[in-house]
Image (cartoon, rainbow, N blue to C red):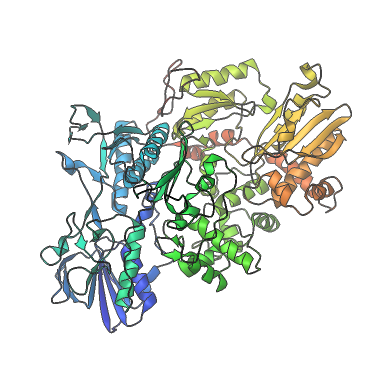
């Protein structure tokens, strides 16, 4: 047990429990008054941590899930934090409590934040079930999965009982550890508390597509002898079972001294007071209206109410905010308000695409004006903006806010001051505007001033919109900062790193980060991939060496594309789509031996789907030995150069488009950029290669080549515009060198060439001046970047295969059995996820 010293003050508030609600209460008390001291008792051997983000611990065993920044309130002299200290009894009459070591403490007010235990189904063998509630639970699961994999020589067969939020997050964590997962749920669809039938069944399908097995509509009857039994008599073979069927309030301290709710929990009123004077309860241990709720937003609201009451205020608890967002890789699911349309007269405005796995629904009042709730599965993009509008009139037709329906940009949402943007920290739009006016002009400052987005983070997009709108109204230029860690934009950071010749992320953080301390500023999901791309472009080194590996996106880390079933796709480079029969045969053999689904893409390449992580290296080996290399379908780089057959075969062709396309692809392959790039080369004006829909398009004429730039496909297609005409081969290459490198240096994060040119002052005229006229005098420098790239380029698959240390990244388990990545033999089929049928199969 650790004890931090306290200094004497006038009042003592004892807090029992060490979860996020207790943390929030202590912060709120410290912010409101100096005439008190706080003693917090927690059974766990660590300070309160972010249980909302518990699933992160599956991916990183070193992530301690900190709440807030730094040490939080625990270094405040008014606070005594007692970890590893269990409270065994409370005496409201004497205003005292007793701990397991026999110590007693007097208090003026007592707040019970004891949380909950994971409920276990009442079945034989329940004692052998694992649970998912704490860091220790996750660490134990990590150890058991690793041990089982090593001992069994295969992925462990695991089951999760419960298909709610926690159950699905536990299933995702087990799957991330390499286990096979079956979700057992008593209802016909998962997340039934948050999703209606159509939304739930859509999520069922998405989960199955990702490789989860769902056993729905029945409860297990026993766990015995390695089998999970069901009343039907059927059994499921299991190596490990996790129970996530709900919570049981930790209310044992109230036995005989406090009123307990019908479903457990300390009964509280709207002030969060219990049945005993000066005793309060918050979070999962509190029973309000006969219910205990395991969500962070109402727990934090209760904490604020109690802090306000203890400091002389009159706050009341308004009831449970049941908004929820699923934290599971590859699945976008959220709900808020009356998502099930239970209110009288409620109308449901729905967009449903069962085949595409998208379901969006808004629930509005009978007059179709007031927003009552929403459900989003497959695309939860509107959630952050709409949730603060709950109970308010929408500024347009409800259907206009369903992004998946393709109705264009939704009406602008100007949130009123009282609209709650962050329910976890109870931050309103007005709080954000006042913080901006008070000197918080960026997201990092806003988080520090208001606490917005510092818990679950789902409100940050809405908070950023409120901030930027307020800055515009103040006449302040909106920051172009890359993220809260870097005041520089992406292009500014590129130039800074280029001029200083830095080679590691740690050096970049130290030199340009805020705060300039790599031990504190470890970056985020925005700045880390940007830094990785910048370093790759400037230095051409293996992207996973040094500290660069941890910076990459998921696909870059695997050198392959992660698919929705948890497997990967492999795309070998086929320059210009030109391939020999021998190479085709190798691809066919690999696909057959590893049971991979094959698809010829729109980019004239062959995509191989369904490979597991450990299968990637042996697949690469066979492809590399046959003369293939990585097509970098996973990277923000050149994807492909599409071509027609040109003058080699076509009677209309006037130039050899295939040869030029091969030359371009081999020239720019592997060159990292702000976004993916695609080129096209057409052998005549008939444009069979669709070159004007590409970032760089080349069209043959009888006089040479016409060069088009800034064309993009995707959600906002754009036609390329003419940059120069009738060019010979070498001039064409020089102009493309200059154009591509100028784009890489000056574009912002994830900005396609079309949007980049639109936002450049002068647009295409400026680009022509720089590329053709060399108006900035940098043409030679831009060309030199490509020349250096050609000298240093190394295929990433081949580079990985040559180094045993690099290959270690592609082992699912530390002690994975040798040969586990090998195919089962010619003609066999090995699938790690659900088989994707060839079109027309039943």
Which of the pair 82/620 is nearer the observer? 82
Residue 60 shows up from this direction = no
Q: Is residue 763 left or right of residue 258?
A: right
Q: Position of residue 610 (x, y in %)?
A: 47, 28
Q: Residue furthest left?
A: 256
Q: Is residue 142 left or right of residue 615?
A: left
Q: Position of residue 563 (x, y in %)?
A: 48, 34
> In the figure, 222 relative to 298: above or below?
above
Residue 364 shows up from this direction = yes
Check the picture and name the quadrant holding the N terminus.
bottom left
In percent of the image, x 21 and y 26: which residue is there? Answer: 234
Q: Position of residue 427 (x, y in %)?
A: 44, 65
Which of the pair 797/35 is nearer the observer? 35
Which of the pair 347/793 is nearer the observer? 347
Q: Position of residue 749 (x, y in %)?
A: 62, 50
How many numbered discs? 0
In percent of the image, x 57 and y 25: which residue is there? Answer: 623
> In the figure, 445 relative to 137: above or below?
below
User: Which image quadrant for residue 725?
Assistant: top right
In percent of the image, x 78 and y 17: which residue is there? Answer: 650
> In the figure, 201 relative to 582: above or below?
below
């Amino acid at each position: 047990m650790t004890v931090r010293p306290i200094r004497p003050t006038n009042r003592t508030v004892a807090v029992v429990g060490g979860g996020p609600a207790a943390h929030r209460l202590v912060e709120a008390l410290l912010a409101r008054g100096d005439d008190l001291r706080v003693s917090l008792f927690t059974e766990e051997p660590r300070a309160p941590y972010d249980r909302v983000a518990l699933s992160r611990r599956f991916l990183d065993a070193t992530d301690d899930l900190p709440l807030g920044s730094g040490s939080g309130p625990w270094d405040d002299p008014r606070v005594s934090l007692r970890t590893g200290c269990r409270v065994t009894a409370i005496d409201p009459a004497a205003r005292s409590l007793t701990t397991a070591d026999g110590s007693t403490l007097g208090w003026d007010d007592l707040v019970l934040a004891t949380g909950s235990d994971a409920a276990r189904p009442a079945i034989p063998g329940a004692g052998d079930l694992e649970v998912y509630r704490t860091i220790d639970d996750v660490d134990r699961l990590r150890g058991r999965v690793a041990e089982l994999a090593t001992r069994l020589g295969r992925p462990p067969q695991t089951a999760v009982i419960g298909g709610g939020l926690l159950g699905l997050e536990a299933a995702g964590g087990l799957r991330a550890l390499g286990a096979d997962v079956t979700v057992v749920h008593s209802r016909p669809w998962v997340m039934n508390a948050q999703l209606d039938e159509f939304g739930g069944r859509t999520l069922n399908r998405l989960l199955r597509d990702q490789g989860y097995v769902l056993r729905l509509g029945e409860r297990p009857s026993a766990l015995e002898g390695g089998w999970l039994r069901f009343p039907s008599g059927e059994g499921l073979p299991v190596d490990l079972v996790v129970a996530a069927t709900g919570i049981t309030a930790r209310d044992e301290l109230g036995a005989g001294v406090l009123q307990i709710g019908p479903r457990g929990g300390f009964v509280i009123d709207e002030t969060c007071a219990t049945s005993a004077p000066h005793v309060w309860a918050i979070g999962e241990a509190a029973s309000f209206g006969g219910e205990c709720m395991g969500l962070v937003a109402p727990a934090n609201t209760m904490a604020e109410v109690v802090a306000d009451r203890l400091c002389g205020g009159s706050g009341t608890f308004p009831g449970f905010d049941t908004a929820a967002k699923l934290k599971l890789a590859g699945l976008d699911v959220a709900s808020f308000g009356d998502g099930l349309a239970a209110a009288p007269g409620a109308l449901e405005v729905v967009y449903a695409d069962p085949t595409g796995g998208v379901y969006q629904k808004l629930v509005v009042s009978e007059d179709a004006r007031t927003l009552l709730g929403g459900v989003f599965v497959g695309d939860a993009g509107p959630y952050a903006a709409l949730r603060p509008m709950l109970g308010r009139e929408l500024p347009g037709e409800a259907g206009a806010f369903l992004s998946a329906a393709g109705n264009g940009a939704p009406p602008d949402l100007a949130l009123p001051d009282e609209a709650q943007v962050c329910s976890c920290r109870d931050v309103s739009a007005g709080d954000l505007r006042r913080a901006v006016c008070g000197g918080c002009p960026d997201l990092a400052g806003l988080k520090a001033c208001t606490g917005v987005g510092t818990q679950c983070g789902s409100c940050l997009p809405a908070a950023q919109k409120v901030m930027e709108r307020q800055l515009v109204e103040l006449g302040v230029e909106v920051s172009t900062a890359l993220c809260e860690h870097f005041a520089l934009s992406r292009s500014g950071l590129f130039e800074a790193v280029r001029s200083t010749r830095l080679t590691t992320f740690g050096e970049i953080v130290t030199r340009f980060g805020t705060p300039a301390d790599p031990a504190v500023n470890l970056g985020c999901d925005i700045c880390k991939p940007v830094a990785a791309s910048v370093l790759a472009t400037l230095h051409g080194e293996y992207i996973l060496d040094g500290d660069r590996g941890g910076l990459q996106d998921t696909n870059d880390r695997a050198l392959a594309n992660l698919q929705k079933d948890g497997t990967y796709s492999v795309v070998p480079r086929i320059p210009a789509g030109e391939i020999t029969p021998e190479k085709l045969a190798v691809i066919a053999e690999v696909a057959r031996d590893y049971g991979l689904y094959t698809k010829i893409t729109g980019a004239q390449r062959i995509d191989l789907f369904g490979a597991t992580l450990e299968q990637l290296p042996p697949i690469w080996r066979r492809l590399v030995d046959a003369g293939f290399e990585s097509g970098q379908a996973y990277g923000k780089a050149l994807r492909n150069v599409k071509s027609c057959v040109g003058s080699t075969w076509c009677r209309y062709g006037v130039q050899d488009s295939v040869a030029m396309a091969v030359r371009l692809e081999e020239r720019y392959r592997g060159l990292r950029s702000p976004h993916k790039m695609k080129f096209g080369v057409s052998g005549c004006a008939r444009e069979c290669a669709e070159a004007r829909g590409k970032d760089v398009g080349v069209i043959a004429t009888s006089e040479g080549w016409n060069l088009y730039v800034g064309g993009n496909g995707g959600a906002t297609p754009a036609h390329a515009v003419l940059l120069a005409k009738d060019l010979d081969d070498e001039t064409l290459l020089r102009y493309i060198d200059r154009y591509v490198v100028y784009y890489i240096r000056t574009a912002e994060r994830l900005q396609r060439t079309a949007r980049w040119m639109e936002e450049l002052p002068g647009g295409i005229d400026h680009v022509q001046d720089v590329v053709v006229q060399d108006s900035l005098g940098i043409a030679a420098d831009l060309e030199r970047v490509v020349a250096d790239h050609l000298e240093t380029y190394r295929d990433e698959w081949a580079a990985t295969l040559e180094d045993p240390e690099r290959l270690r990244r592609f082992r699912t388990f530390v002690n994975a059995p040798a040969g586990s990545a090998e195919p089962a033999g010619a003609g066999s089929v090995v699938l790690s996820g659900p088989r994707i049928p060839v079109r027309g199969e039943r």
